[in-house]
Amino acid sequence: MSKNASRNTALNGICPYFTMFPLDFPYSILSRHASEGQWVIDPFCGRGTTNYASRLLGLPSIGIDSSGVAAALTEAKLANTSPQSILRAAQRILEEVGTPCHVPTGEFWEWAYHPDVLNVLCRLREGLLSDCNSDSRKALRAILMGALHGPLGKTKQSYFSNQCPRTYAPKPSYSVRFWKARDLNPNRVDVLRIITDRAIRYYAKEPKNAVGRIICGDSRSRTLYSRRKIRSPISWVITSPPYYGMNTYISDQWLRQWFVGGQSIVDYSNQEQMQHSSPEYFALQLKQVWQNVGSICVPDARLVIRFGGINERKNDSLPILKNSLKDSGWRIQTIKSAGTASKGYRQADHFTKAEAAREEHDIWATWKG
Ligand SMILES: C[S@@+](CC[C@H](N)C(=O)[O-])C[C@H]1O[C@@H](n2cnc3c(N)ncnc32)[C@H](O)[C@@H]1O
């Protein structure tokens, strides 16, 4: 395997997500230790950092996440396509879906998007919901999700929305108050121009031939790991589960969640997400995931977990993780400090505005199951 694989990493930033680990984390592990042809899996893939690192190194990979937003973003990280095909996919949908069946209504939507922009977005959404099988459509979907909300540019606007944060979807009543107080109206932006600019930025130089599969599902569920779904034995598991207490993956992404088929209101449901009711129950669920992935691994496969804690929950993170690995079939080899969160890179950042960040650890284990 080439250790000098291309490091054009623009695609990794196709859409903001939160609590991701830095690309260098999976990339440096795999570039130093993995061999050609070895399969990689991340059972909590988030925005697909592990899968993207695998792609850069020519390694085949699997990603699992129960958030439809995360799974869609990770699919785009493995898309083999070009800016021209992405633009053609968008134009084709707009030809096919002349009038959207459903356009969300209410004060938030009136202030968030110019009506013409919302109409185009709804047509694209409907086309993608009825068919998102090709790589061009998967890439288009992630591009649209990445441009769905964000700041108004000083010169050229590169998001579809009125002034918004880009990482989190804004809560409706707060945003409407904000826009009204400042008399900020949404602009009539050119959706196809924004798609084109972004398609060039993310897909013009992408290495071709990513191999892999992304599954939108609950990693705790044993049925996901059947040989029918995951055919090749896995050699590497590189992952970062939600930290104990971190349970806003769906509600904080509610606008993108809407775009991939969710409701047009904030979605507070946490179906298929890890439950955070007690450290013991949390560890038990993680253990289930470790056993599930182990069942599709080769002997002596390696598991690398980055784990930490959030200040809202005082529990030490390391005992939770060690507990989850006990009698799971994985034998712990090393535990190293990964330091504390540095701005913009670690998942604890988003919960540590007032207090110092908590220490994170990298735990290496070997499959002996
Ligand atoms: C810390 S993030 C992973 C971030 C990832 N390392 C990255 O770089 O983007 C944890 C992810 O676990 C997902 N998740 C939570 N519960 C899950 C479950 N039961 N099954 C699968 N994914 C789950 C969340 O949706 C979230 O995307």
Image (cartoon, rainbow, N blue to C red):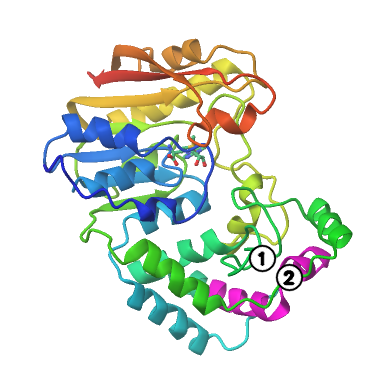
Residue closer to the observer: 85 or 300: 85
Task: Note whether 289 is above or below 339 in the view shown.
Answer: below
Which amino acid is tagged 2?
Pro
Does residue 236 appear anywhere in the picture?
Answer: no
As drawn, the residue found furthest toward the front would be: 155
Q: CA distance from mark 1 to mark 2?
A: 6 Å
For disc 2, does the CB lie below 8 Å from ligand 1?
no
Q: Picture quarter containing residue 29?
A: top left
Residue under the image location 38 percent in, 74 percent down: 86
**Residue 294: in magenta span:** no
Task: Left or right? Give the position of 304 relative to 149.
Answer: left
Question: Are circles 1 and 2 on residues that touch, CB within 8 Å?
Answer: yes
Task: Note whether 95 is above or below 32 in the view shown.
Answer: below
Label 1 neighbourhood size at 10 Å, few (<14), some (14-19), many (20+)?
many
Residue under the image location 29 percent in, 43 percent down: 53
Comes first in the chain, label 1 or label 2: 1
Residue 80 marker: none
Q: Which range is magenta?
A: 106-126
**Residue 123: in magenta span:** yes
Residue 186 marker: 2
For the stretch drawn in magenta, the main secondary structure is: helix
Label 2 neighbourhood size at 10 Å, few (<14), some (14-19), many (20+)?
some
Residue under the image location 31 percent in, 67 percent down: 204
Task: Note whether 326 is above or below 140 in the view shown.
Answer: above
Task: Note whether 86 is above or below 96 in the view shown.
Answer: above
Name the residue carrying label 1: 161
Q: Position of residue 143 (x, y in %)?
A: 47, 64
For disc 1, does the CB lie below 8 Å from ligand 1?
no
Which amino acid is tagged 1?
Ser
